[in-house]
Every structure is written in structure tokens, then in C-alpha cells.
Amino acid sequence: RGGIWHDFCNIVCNQINQSINLIKMKKMKKLFIIATTCIMSLTACADQHQFIVYSELPVKAQTFIQTYFNQDDVTYIERDLDGVSYEYDVYLANAIEIEFDSQGSLQSIDCKRTPVPKGVVPKLITNFVEQRYPDFYIVGYMIERRNQKVELNNELELIFDREGNFQRIDD
């Protein structure tokens, strides 16, 4: 009797150990797959987002910065892969943020509380703001697919069409 019972217990224990090992291997496999996926995702994100030096900016963006700002004020530049093309975010020492497209064309500028430099925003838009809002000035400018947007230092946002004609106040 003791021998059969002992053999039976050994068989059951071996099966339990094999099941536990199989479960551990499956968990390890899942963890490995998850870890690999995370590493690949982080690598892909790192490839999409890079810090670059000033000379790597498109020439048109460099010209813009030299025209309206001091190149020495550039604190850092990020190049982001946006779908199939790059965008460039330039950060200046005075907290100004400028975004350029892959060709170096201005997409947006955010001067926080200081006025956007004269000549950045089209004259038709600046004239409109000066006439309608003489006590305020433009602190942000964005060029979108179908329109242009300015933000005033009173946080009012005005929308203009691509030609610079006033459309509406953005609420």
C-alpha cells in the first residue's frame, strides 16, 4: 500500500511541478513580449523626437531667427517626425517658442507676454489689431491649413483667412 500511494503522490507532484513550470514559462514569455514591445516603442519614439543643433535647422528657419531674434538666444531645438515629415520646435532663452515645418516655414510663434516682432504677422492682420484693439498687442501667431490665428495679450484669439481677412473671434 505505501508503495502505491507513494508512487501516486510522486506522479501528482511531478505533474503539478510541470504545470507550474509551464505557467512560469508562459508568464515569462508574455513578460518578454511586453518588454520587447515597450523597448521597440521607446526606440521608435526616440527616433521621432531628437534634439538638434542650430546648423541642422532648414536655412529658411535659420534666416527667420536671424531676422527677428538673436541666434545666441536659442536654448535648444527639437526635431519631431510628424507622420512623414519633420517639424522643428525652437526654444529661446526668453521663453519664446517657434515652430517651423520641414521646409523651415513658420507654423507658429508664442511669445508668451511679449509682442511678436514686427514683420512676423502679415500687415493686414496687424493693422486690423491696431485699429480694433489699440490697447493690446499680438503675443502669438499660428498659420493653419485654412486660416491664421493671433492671440492678444488679453488672451483674445482672432481668426483670419489665409489672405488675412478677419473671420471671427475664437471662443
Image (cartoon, rainbow, N blue to C red):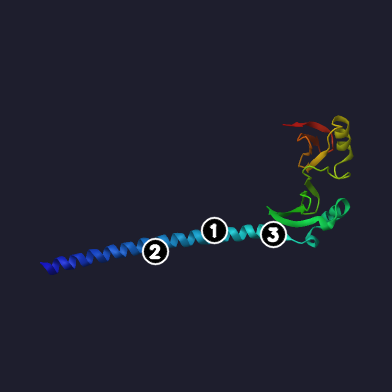
Taking the spot 84% from the left edge, 31% from the top edge, the residue there is 133
Mark 2 packing: few (<14 Cα in 10 Å), some, or many (20+)? few
Residue found at the very far left of the displayed protein: 1
Where residue 10 appears, as percent x and y from the top left, is 21, 67
Secondary structure under the numbered disc 1 in the rendered image: helix
Residue at x 20% of width, y 65% of height: 9
Q: Amino acid at mark 3?
A: Gln
Q: Quadrant of residue 76?
A: bottom right
Residue 169 point in image, percent of width and height: 77, 31
Contact between marks 3 and 1 (CB within 8 A): the answer is no
Tell me, for residue 29, which label it has, or none: none
33 relative position to 50: left or right: left
Q: Please report whichever mark, 1 or 2, sits nearer to the chain's N-terminal start.
A: 2
Q: CA distance from mark 3 to mark 2?
A: 38 Å
Sooner in the amino-acid sequence: mark 3 or mark 1? 1
Give the vertical position of 33 relative to 144 (above or below): below
Residue 67 against residue 25 in the figure, above or below:
above
Q: Give the residue pinned by disc 1.
A: 38
Judging by the rendered image, the residue that carries numbered circle 3 is: 50
- Residue at disc 2, secondary structure: helix
64 or 92, nearer to the observer: 92
Q: Amino acid at mark 1?
A: Cys
- x, y percent for residue 128: 87, 33
Q: Which residue corresponds to mark 2? A: 25
Residue type at the position of mark 2: Met
Identify which residue is drawn at 82% across, 54% down: 61
Q: Where the N terminus falls, by quadrant?
A: bottom left
Q: Residues within 10 Å of mark 1 (few under 14, many from 20)?
A: few
